[in-house]
Image (spheres, grey):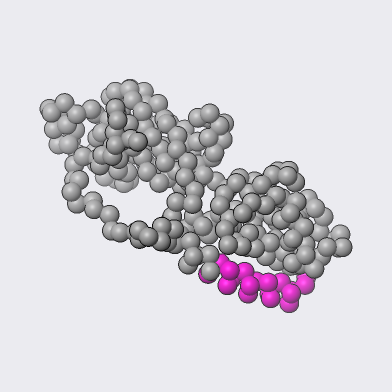
Amino acid sequence: MSATRLELRDRAKRRADMEDSRFVDDREWNDYINEAVSALHDVIVMVYRDYFREIVEIPIVTGTKTYDLPNGTNYSGAKPFYKGKAVYWKESDYLYELDPFMIGENSTSLYAISYAASIGLGAGRTLRYRYINSSIEFSPVPTENGTVELWYIPQATKLLEDDDEIDFAIVNGWEEYILLEAAIKALEKEESLEQAAVLGAQLARLRDRITVAAQQRDAGRPQRVRDVRSYRWFPRRRRIY
């Protein structure tokens, strides 16, 4: 289901029984709506299923280790970065999954680098990465040009106009979360604390429902434990379709 900011604001006013009240103006209601959209986004993100996924390609340049993450203006206007899902070195028809490096550890085994070179593997496959501030950093410093494919979760998009629609999947009445959270903020400002508490209890139940319902998106093929022991030195490979 999709809903505009105007629809969400009107429904939130009804939930708070404040349709005719001017105690909270529309500008403040809009703030509450956007805060609630971000909160619902977080609830869905934290079940770690693919309700949100964006992909950008980052051109890698020899000798350059740090690159900007998507911020809404770079990478052809890709949505701003929130959380990473996977990083791949792209080579021919394959993606080679890269691992992160931890602070204080040797980011990539020297044995792996030298062995990869001896058998003719590209140095890009031995890279590791880490998200630092608004950038992604690679180690060791890249020694060849190439392409990294970044899979990530974007930030929630703010609704700036009344006809702007929520840009992510809202199913089974989950938009009610936005209405309740916005209504509670308005009632708390009005100091209608008893009514706010009633809606707060409803919000908690709805959060629990969303958290449970969102966990298994593929009902026919449940999640399984990932095999990582087979790939000690080199990144996992997958074909590009």
Percent x, y of residue 222: 35, 60
Does residue 5 appear to the left or right of 175 in the view shown?
Answer: right
Q: Nearer the viewer, residue 134 or 75?
A: 75
Quadrant of the rendered structure where residue 149 is?
top left
| Residue 73 visible in the displayed image | yes
Residue at (45%, 51%) from the top-left corner?
50
Quadrant of image for the C terminus: top left
- The answer to whether residue 185 shows anywhere in this view is no
Residue 205 lies in magenta, yes or no? yes
Left or right: residue 139 versus residue 75 is left
Residue placed furthest toward the front: 220
Position of 71 compared to 236: left or right? right
**Position of the N terminus by quadrant:** bottom right
The residue at the point 58 percent across, 62 percent down is 172
Is 112 drawn above or below residue 181 in the view shown?
above
Residue at the image point whose x is 76% and y is 54% from the top: 28
Residue 44 locus on image (x, y percent): 51, 57
Residues in magenta, as a range: 191-208
Which residue: 24% across, 53% down?
Answer: 227
| Quadrant assignment, res 126 | top left
- Measured as percent of width and height from the top left, residue 90 is found at 32, 31
Q: Position of residue 81 (x, y in %)?
A: 50, 41
